[in-house]
Amino acid sequence: MAEKVITENEEKKSVSFVEQIVKDDLAAGKNGGRVQTRFPPEPNGYLHIGHAKAIAIDFGMAKKYGGICNLRFDDTNPVKEDTEYIENIEQDIKWLGYEWANVYYASDYFQELWDFAVWLIKQGRAYVDEQSAEVIAQQKGTTTSPGTNSPYRDRPVEENLRLFEFMNSGKCEPGTLVLRAKIDMAHPNMLFRDPLIYRVLNIPHVKTGDKWNAYPMYDFTHGQSDYLEGVTHSLCTLEFVEHRPLYDLFVEWMREWIADCGKDAESDSKLSILNSQLSTYTGPRQTEFNKLNLNYTLMSKRNLLALVNEKMVSGWDDPRMPTICGFRRRGYSPESIVKFIDKIGYTKLDALNDMALLESVVRDDLNSRAIRVSAVLDPVKVVITNYPEDQVELLTAINNPENEADGTHTVEFGREIWIERNDFQEVAEKKFMRLAPGKEVRLKNAYIIKCNEEHPCDKDSEGRVTTIYCTYDSETRSGMPGADRKIKGKTLHWVSCKHAVEAEVRLYERLWKVENPRDDMAAIREEQNCDAVTAMKQIINPDSLHVLSATSTSTPTLLQSILCSTKQ
C-alpha cells in the first residue's frame, strides 16, 4: 500500500463526517487497511460544479490516506452515451488537478453481471416478468399499502433462464420482458418491491458492440461494480440514502455468488481471485453527503443539454453555464473551485449555497495570481494639452502587486489617452472623486492630471462628451518624489490612444433571473402544463451577455495570450 501522506498538523484539523468514517475504518483495520474510491460519471453530458464536489472527495480521500481512486464510466445506457463526453470528463478531472489510478467502465463487468443474474435465477431470487411498465408500477403499491405479486413471480427456473436468454437474443421487443429481483412486495422501502434489474434495449454499445441487447439497471450495476473493483468507500449524494439498503443487499448476494461459484472457478479467473479475498475484503461502504447547490444556477444535465440544444447558450463551455469547462472559459482557476468546495464542506443537510460566496473565493484566488493589464470598456478621449505632442514615455507597471516575483511590464504613455466615460462628470456630484472641471486625479503608473475649468470638454451634436482636456504635473510621475503629493481625486486606469489594441469584451451576468430556477421551473410547468424549455424561456436572463468593443494597453501578442488563457 502507498505511504500515507497526512501530516500531524492535518490530523489536528476538524474533519468532515465522511473523512471520519474513513479514519474509523482504517483504525479498525477494515479491508486490510486499504482506501479505494471511485468517481463514476455517466458519459451523457459535461461535468458541472456539482460533480467537482464529488471529484474532490473521491480523489481527495484516496490521496490523503494513501489509497487510489479509479475513474469508472457508468455506461449502462447506450442510448445517451457519447465518446465526446468521455473525453471531456477526463479533461475536466485533470484540469481540477486530480489523477486516477485506472479507467474502468461498467460495461467491463457486463459478463460478470450477467452470470450473477443467471445465478440469482437459479437461486429463485430473480424472475422474468412480461407485464407492461405501467402495470408493474401499479402493482408496486404505495408507501402506505403493500404491493401485489406479479403473476409471473413463481415461474419455473428453467423458463426464467430461457426467457432471460431470449431477452439478449436481439429478437425480443424492448419493453416486453424484464428481469426482476424477487425480494418483498410488501417491504416498506419501495425499492425492495421486486426491482427491475435487466431491460431490453437492442441498441449497440460503444464498447461492447452487438454482444448485449439486454442491459443491467443502475441499481444492479453500481454496487456490484464497486465490489468487483475492490472499492472500500462508495461516496455519493443524499438521493442515494434510500438506495443504500438495496445496494448492501445486492453486494451481499454477490458475495454469496462468489463464495458459491468462485471455489470451482479457474485459479487465475476474476471469480477465483475474488473468492480468495472474501476473508479480507468485506465490500464497499456507501456514505452519502449533500449535493452542491448554487442559487441562480440550474445543474441538471438534462436541463443543461436542453439549453445547448435549443441554442439558448453557445455550448457546454459557455461561460454562463455551471459546467467545469464553462467556469474554465470564464477564467476561474481549478484551485479556486477546490477552495470553494473545501469552504462549504460536506454535511448530511441539503443547502442552497450563495453564488456570491463562490465569486468571493474566485476573486481572492485571482487577486493572488492574476497578471494585471488595463482595458477601457466605454472609452472617452483625454487630451493632455501641456504634454509634448510627439513624445512617448515607457512607464513601468507591476504585473501583480500580490506577488513581486511576477515582475513588471512597460506601457506607453502619450499626449492622448482613453479613460472610462463614467470616470468623468462635466457637472460633478458632491461626492464625485474622479475627473471633473478643476479636479485632479492620478493616472495609474503615470502622472497627476487636472481637468481644465474654462474648456473642460468637447461634445457632439447630441451633447455626448467626445474629448476631455487636461494638464499634467510633470513632477508627479509614479516613482518620483512628487508622486507622493496628496490629492482628493481617485486613481484612474487608462490606455494610450496611439498604442491601444481593440478587443472584443464579453461581460457575463447570471443566466437566470430567479434565485432558484429549478423550483421556479417546476412551478411554471405545473401551472402552465408546459415542457421544460418553455418554462426555461420565461426565467432565463435576456441580459446575461453583453458584447463590447474595448481598448487595451496590451500589445497584440500579450492581449491574445491573456484572452486565450481563459479559454483553455
Image (cartoon, helix red, strand yellow):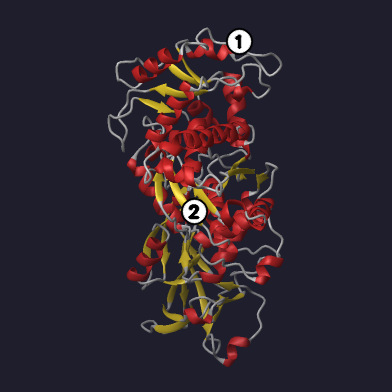
The disc placed on residue 148 is 1
Q: Is 160 displayed left or right of 9 in the figure?
A: left
Q: Residues within 10 Å of mark 2 (few under 14, many from 20)?
A: many
Q: Residue at x 38, y 48 (%)?
A: 88
Q: Residue at x 58, y 61 (%)?
A: 65
**Image quadrant of residue 342?**
bottom right
Q: Would residue 308 be visible to someone looking at this image?
A: no
Front-most of residues 515 and 414? 515
Q: Would residue 158 be visible to someone looking at this image?
A: yes
In the displayed structure, 175 sits above or below 455; it is above
Identify the residue position indicated by label 2 in the image: 69
**Image quadrant of residue 528?**
top right
Q: Is 417 displayed left or right of 186 in the figure?
A: left
Element on which disc 1 rests: loop
Give residue 156's position: percent from left, percent from top.
Answer: 46, 11
**Image quadrant of residue 478?**
bottom right
**Which badge, 2 or 1, comes first in the chain's sequence?**
2
Q: Amino acid at mark 1?
A: Thr
Give residue 421's position: percent from left, percent from top.
Answer: 52, 62
Front-most of residues 377 and 289? 289
Give residue 20's position: percent from left, percent from top.
Answer: 68, 54
Q: Residue at x 41, y 37 (%)?
A: 264
